Image (tube, rainbow, N blue to C red):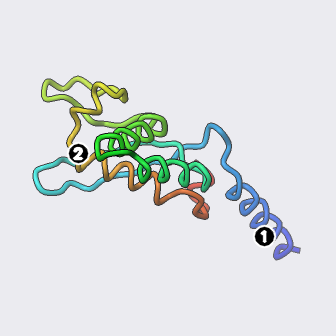
Amino acid sequence: MVEEKVNSEIKKILKKVLYYESDYTRDATIPECKELPEVNFTYIPLTTIEAAKATEKVVRGKDLVESIQATMEMVISQVTKWDITKPNGDPVLIIMEELKKVDAFVVQRIATEIKEGAGEILTESEVKN
């Protein structure tokens, strides 16, 4: 009886992880490195198709500038919050004008985190998020 209940609960969890609700988000951290502080951010995961479209847009850019712009647009569309601040302590808004001033390494790491998480199976703790 207990085993059946456990199996039933596992099946419910597996069903939840195969479909992202529109309000589902993930938290991620880019560890401190070189002269850059740790960055914490929350993002909306890409579905597999969204990840493919974002990658295609970057790859098919007519030049490097267009490819970088596509990456930045994807970051803006998926990140819901972060702890990046300006030297005076004000928060950096998640908009193109401000993202252009964020360290390129950080922007690329955020984009990589978002793209690499696309379509992966979630852990039980993430499902509870």
Q: Residue at x 29, y 33 (%)?
A: 99
Left or right placement of residue 36 versus residue 41 in this view = left
Q: Is residue 40 above or below residue 55?
A: above
The amino acid on which the numbered mark 1 sits, given as a three-letter code, is Val
Q: Are marks 1 and 2 in contact (CB under 8 Å)?
A: no
Disc sitting over residue 110 in the figure: none
Q: Residue at x 60, y 43 (%)?
A: 24
Q: Secondary structure at mark 2?
A: helix
Distance from disc 1 to disc 2, alpha carbons, whole Å, reads 46 Å
Q: Which residue is mark 2?
A: 104
Q: Position of residue 1 (x, y in %)?
A: 89, 74
Q: Residue at x 32, y 43 (%)?
A: 68
For the residue carrying disc 1, how many other residues have a C-alpha within 10 Å: few (<14), some (14-19), or many (20+)? Answer: few
Residue located farthest toward the right when viewing the structure as drawn? 1
The quadrant holding residue 17 is: bottom right
Q: Which residue is mark 1?
A: 6
Residue located farthest toward the front when viewing the structure as drawn? 62
Q: Secondary structure at mark 1?
A: helix
For the residue carrying disc 2, how many other residues have a C-alpha within 10 Å: few (<14), some (14-19), or many (20+)? Answer: few
Q: Position of residue 107 (x, y in %)?
A: 30, 45
The quadrant holding residue 122 is: bottom right
Left or right placement of residue 33 versus residue 7 in this view = left
Comparing labels 1 and 2, the label whose residue is closer to the camera: 2
